[in-house]
Image (spheres, rainbow, N blue to C red):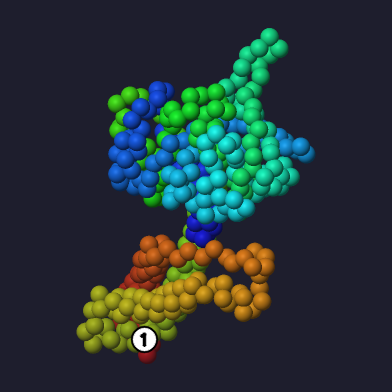
Amino acid sequence: MNGLEGQLKKRILGAVPQLTIHSNVALNDWQQDVAQLSALKGVQGVTPSVTTQAMLQSPSNIGAAQIYGVYPQQEQKLLSLTRNTYSGDFDALVAGMYRIILGAELARKLDVVVGNKIRVLSGDGVVYTPLGPIPSQRKFTVAGIFEMGSQVDASVAYMHHDDAQRLMRQTPGQVKQLRVYLDDPFKASTIAPSVQGYFSHEVTTTDWHDSYGHLFGAVKMEKNMMSLMLSLIIAVAAFNIVSALVMMVVDKTTDVAVLKTQGLTTSSVMGIFMIQGSLNAIIGLLTGVAAGVLLTLNLNEITNVMGISILGAGQNLPVQLELNQLSWIVIGTLIMTLLATIYPALRAANVQPASTLRHE
């Protein structure tokens, strides 16, 4: 589940804005704003951006996409999508050349390759005429295709910031929107107030939760269900410790009674059985953790040796071992098994020597 979440974070949040700042007025000194915001804790980088929803039309098909206008040179080190672009790259996005980079699935739907021309119709910059509203439109040349292996391949396209503004009938070079890259995209809602507080005028922020929050919410729910299942497995193991200790108490009742007649205290008897149960739990826990970690770190190698391909040929399971989660599992298991030893130990401690040895 951690591997799945990590892959989604990389393939989706590496291609769409993690946190976006919207200003109603032009940012005249946006270069300084970028430098100041980039210094905030948790912020990896800031770049100018512009966004519009558009229809893309090729000679054979039509499709919808979210268009992001960017400055390629500033995006190269921050946007992981640039490393997943083939048949061209982001350097091909030159202002005034009207070039566009499409997702692989979107390119297949439009049946276009690099060098083909498509018509882009934007909902922003609509002109109202006696014949009705006419959307802003312009022909663009496909300059590259990217593939992230997620749903963004079918709904996202990139073009130069100035070309996107011309398409939207805005002043080229004017910046009203900043795109913030974060060290941890899941902290976007936490960082947003500090980002807003930087500006003297009113700005609004949006983050990836607005578009893809439901998908990560589903993954979180699945992780919670996995945690519940794991807790139930541990509870069953703890019940086995209870039953084993109860059987031991029944079997050793006479021995306990004899020891108590020789001066063994009630607390000592209780401690013996709690140590016995805890020792079983610790041995099982150490063995289980060692086996589990080795299996996790070598899972793909094991499946390859066995000839098992779960995700298809050439694809490996995404494996991500989280030490903090492993620590919580170990601590929770120790606490649960320690509590499981209390009842059998109390039964052993409450053995009455006189009644137990009456018929011996």
Position of residue 2 relative to residue 254, above or below, is above
Q: Nearer the viewer, residue 276 or 152?
A: 152
Say left or right for 334 vs 81: left
Percent across and percent down for residue 313 are: 67, 68
Q: Is residue 188 visible?
A: no
Q: Amino acid at mark 1?
A: Thr
Percent across and percent down for residue 262 are: 23, 87
Graded by Cα atoms within 10 Å as few (under 14), some (14 to 19) or many (20 or more), the crowding at tag 1 reads some
Image quarter in which the C terminus is found: bottom left
For disc 1, the marked residue is 254
Position of residue 227 relative to residue 209, above or below, is below
Percent across and percent down for residue 225 are: 53, 55
Q: Residue furthest right?
A: 60
Q: Is residue 302 visible?
A: yes
The residue at the point 66 percent across, 16 percent down is 133
Q: Residue furthest top?
A: 130
Which quadrant would residue 131 be assigned to in this image? top right
Q: Secondary structure at mark 1?
A: helix
